[in-house]
Image (spheres, rainbow, N blue to C red):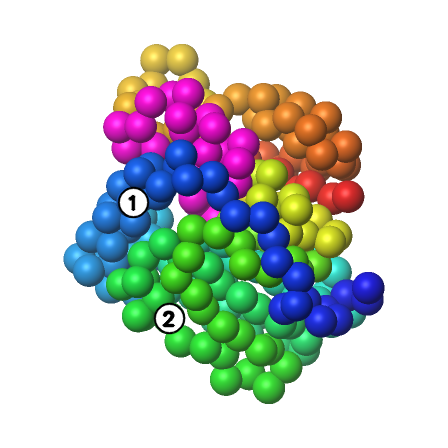
Amino acid sequence: MKAGENSHVQRAPALPQSLAGLQTDVERYYTQKVRTHGATALGVDWTCQPTQELRFVQLLKVCDFAHPFSLNDVGCGYGALLAFLARRHSGAQVDYLGTELSQAMVDHARPSRHPSIRSQFLVTGDIPRIADYSVASGIFNVKLKQPAALWTLFVQQMLAAMHEASRVGFAVNFLAPLKQGMQDIPELYRPSPEVWVRYCTHQFNAKVELACNYGMCEFTLIVRR
C-alpha cells in the first residue's frame, strides 16, 4: 500500500482492558490540566511552547515530508502538533488523526484549515487506524501513583500498539534519568534509554534511532520497520 493510501480502512489492535483504570487516572490528570491552563503548553503539562515544539521537531524526524503520508498523533492533547505541522510544513500533504483520552482536551482542539492537511480528532485510548506513521509526545512521562510494573506494562502495550498501527515507523519521547544528586519527582517516569531501545529493537525487529542531544533531559526514539 502506498503512503497515505486508504489509511482509514485498517484498524490497529485495541489495548487490553487491564489498563483501563490506569488510563482513567491519566485522563483525569490531563483534564484538570487543560481546565486550569487551557489550550497552552501548560495545559498538557509542558513548561513552554518553544520546548514543546522542539519535541515535535524530534518526533517528526520519522516522517518523510517528500511524499504524502498519514499520521496518528497518540495523546494529541489540544492538537498542538497539528498546528505546528500547518505552520512549519505548510507544503506537506498529511492525513492527520489525533487520539486523546480526555474529552476536555479534544474540546479545545481545532481541525486544520490548511488545504493540504486533512484532520480528525477522536476521544479514545486505542489507536483506531493503521497509518504510515505514529507519534506520541509525553504520554509516558507522568505515571502518577501507578505501580512501576503496571506502568511498564502500559509502555510496552502502547509501543506495541504504535508499531502495529504504523506501516513505516513511529516515534515517542521519554524523560531521561537525572544526574546523581538531583532531586526527582516520584510521579514522573525516567527510564534508561537503553531499556526501550533494546525492547523496540528486539521485540519489533526494528531499526531504532536514539535522539538525546537536543538540550533537554529527555530522549526520543525513532523506530522504523
Amino acid beneath label 2: Ala
Amino acid beneath label 1: Thr
Label 2 SS: loop
Which residue in the protein does label 2 denote?
109
**Mark nearer the N terminus (1 vs 2):** 1
Residue 225 sits in which quadrant? Answer: top right
Label 1 SS: helix
Left or right, residue 28 beside residue 68: left
Which residue corresponds to the image point at 59% horizontal and 77% vertical from the top-left?
A: 117
Instruction: Give the farthest residue toward the right.
Output: 1
Left or right, residue 123 beside residue 64: left
Residue placed most toward the observer, 157 or 59: 157
Could you classify mark 1 by the number of other residues whose Cα lies within 10 Å: few (under 14), some (14-19), or many (20 or more)?
A: few
Could you classify mark 2 by the number of other residues whose Cα lies within 10 Å: few (under 14), some (14-19), or many (20 or more)?
A: many
Q: Position of residue 192 (x, y in %)?
A: 53, 22
Residue placed most toward the observer, 79 or 9: 9
Q: CA distance from mark 1 to mark 2?
A: 20 Å
Using the image, determine if residue 155 lies above or below residue 10.
above
Q: Which residues are magenta?
A: 137-158
Which residue corresponds to the image point at 74% horizontal and 44% vertical from the top-left?
A: 224
Which residue in the protein does label 1 denote?
24
